[in-house]
Amino acid sequence: MKRIVYEAENSLEGRERNRGAVHGMVHTLRDFGDTRFLVLRLPKTMLQCVLPAELSLPEDFCDGAAVRVYGDMRAEERAPGGRELLVSRIEVVSAPSEPMPVPIHKYKMGLSPETELDLRPITLRTARSRAMFRLQEGIVRGFRDALYQEGFTEIHTPKLSMGSAEGGANMFKLPYFGKKAVLAQSPQLYKQMMVGAFERVFEVGPVFRAEKHNTPRHLNEYTSLDFEMGFIESFEDIMAMEEKVLAYIFRLLESEYAAELNALKVQLPDISGGIPSIRFDEAKRLVSEKYSREIRDPFDLEPEEETLISRAVYEETGCELAFVTHYPSKKRPFYAMDDPADSRYTLSFDLLMRGMEITTGGQRIHDYSMQVAKMEKKGLDSQEFEDYLMIHKYGMPPHGGLGLGLERLLMRLVGEKNVRMCALFPRDVSRLRP
Ligand code: AMO
């Protein structure tokens, strides 16, 4: 059975062999009087099935039923995927107990985002959601494949820990057998530790941020795509690696996710000419002058500034992505390497895409005394970091890495306004279900 479904999805070759059954979920039945089309939800595509006038449907057949359909597969260029199944028999494998509460067969259901999220177990079945999360798969797959090719090792680090990696107030705290634990804000310290073991590592995993504000760009749990690499000459090596990885991801989406890109009308960004970069202080000045905007926070970028920097870079270069480099030391965590030329700034960067930050990265401190001194300067007790400091004490190469927000990248790719829609089951201040 599995094999036939796979063939039904992937080709029409050996059509004769495709005489048999396909199983799937009833997405909808379109009844035009003389012709009836059953749209079946297969693992990755929809299959159009033509029901002959004389075929009677089983009594318990309805939207949402799990069915087995028998018939002949044939080419039909007007059908999705260029093929359709001429049905001779339908069996209901299992029938739902209630009618579908919302019209999931419609591309746009017209629901409020809240209702759509409340009903996520079924609204994720729409063609639109399926296309979005197939693209999400493609991004992660591309990230993994590209890094395997570059000699990286995939790692899995703990999400329960004792201390903070990124600082700030956005940590979830929880009791842990009489002690206090926190949920990981990022795999930062562990991925650096693993550079000592494997030189090049990456991780795809959940991270937790107790952001108290509901914004369209923040989740309380998101998926972080992280890598970390040793023996770098400069933080620009990290940017070059990110560019390579993104180019790989976009190529993979183009070649293997064309149907999903088409369904969502996604235009992939063109980074074939390289991603331009601009220093943080220059970027601040540029948008302030170009758009007559007062600089309110000299140490960080406001969301509107990110949008304007992106716009200005796009107007100048035609590229929808832009690296902003040399963020102020004041706003970067203790592990960030200061610029030896001017220690007010760090050897770090953010990547903006279509007006929003999708990545943070940079070079880290590898020298023990430099790291202890920076912790003290930031008012941290280096004793609390003795596990982490083992790597500095016992030898580390110059290294750096980055963290890329999966939902943010998907959001910028598909043009979704709210990051919640780019997480299967988003977590925000007021949402812990479904
Ligand atoms: P940072 O905290 O900037 O850096 O996070 C990296 C990237 O993660 C995404 N992101 C978020 N996405 C959704 N909801 C949130 N609340 C949220 N917060 C962050 C963004 C961001 O660019 N350890 C460093 C990375 C590194 O230097 O390797 C870090 O975590 O896309």
Image (tube, grey):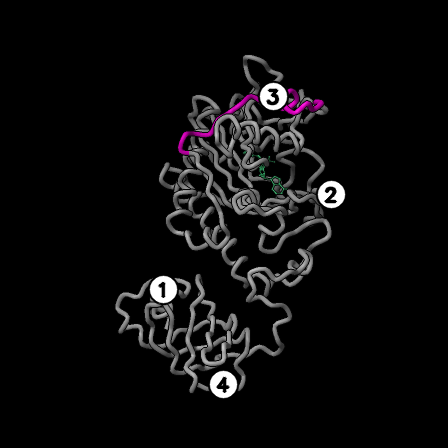
Assign the N terminus to one quadrant of the image.
bottom left
Question: Which dot, 1 or 3, sits closer to the camera?
Answer: 1
**Structural distance between the alpha carbons of marks 1 and 4:** 29 Å
Question: Which dot, 3 or 4, sits closer to the camera?
Answer: 3
Label 1 with label 4: CB-CB less than 8 Å: no
Please, what is the three-letter code of the amino acid marked with disc 3?
Answer: Leu
N-term-proximal mark, 1 vs 2: 1
Is ligand 1 within 8 Å of the beta carbon of the residue shown at mark 4? no
Q: Kindly identify which numbered label has been placed on residue 77.
A: 1
**Relative to 407, does residue 274 appear above or below in the rendering?**
above
* Residue at 55% over, 39% down: 187
Q: Which residue is mark 4?
A: 58
Please, what is the three-letter code of the amino acid marked with disc 2?
Answer: Lys
Assign the C terminus to one quadrant of the image.
bottom right
Q: Say whether residue 168 is magenta.
A: no
Instruction: Report helix, strand or loop for mark 4.
Output: loop
Q: Residue furthest top?
A: 341
Q: Is residue 356 visible?
A: yes
Q: Which residue is mark 3?
A: 286
**Structural distance between the alpha carbons of marks 3 and 4:** 67 Å
Instruction: Report helix, strand or loop for mark 1.
Output: loop
N-term-proximal mark, 1 vs 4: 4
Q: Which residue is mark 2?
A: 212
**Residue 201 at what x, y percent from top left?**
45, 37
Q: Say whether residue 294 is magenta.
A: yes
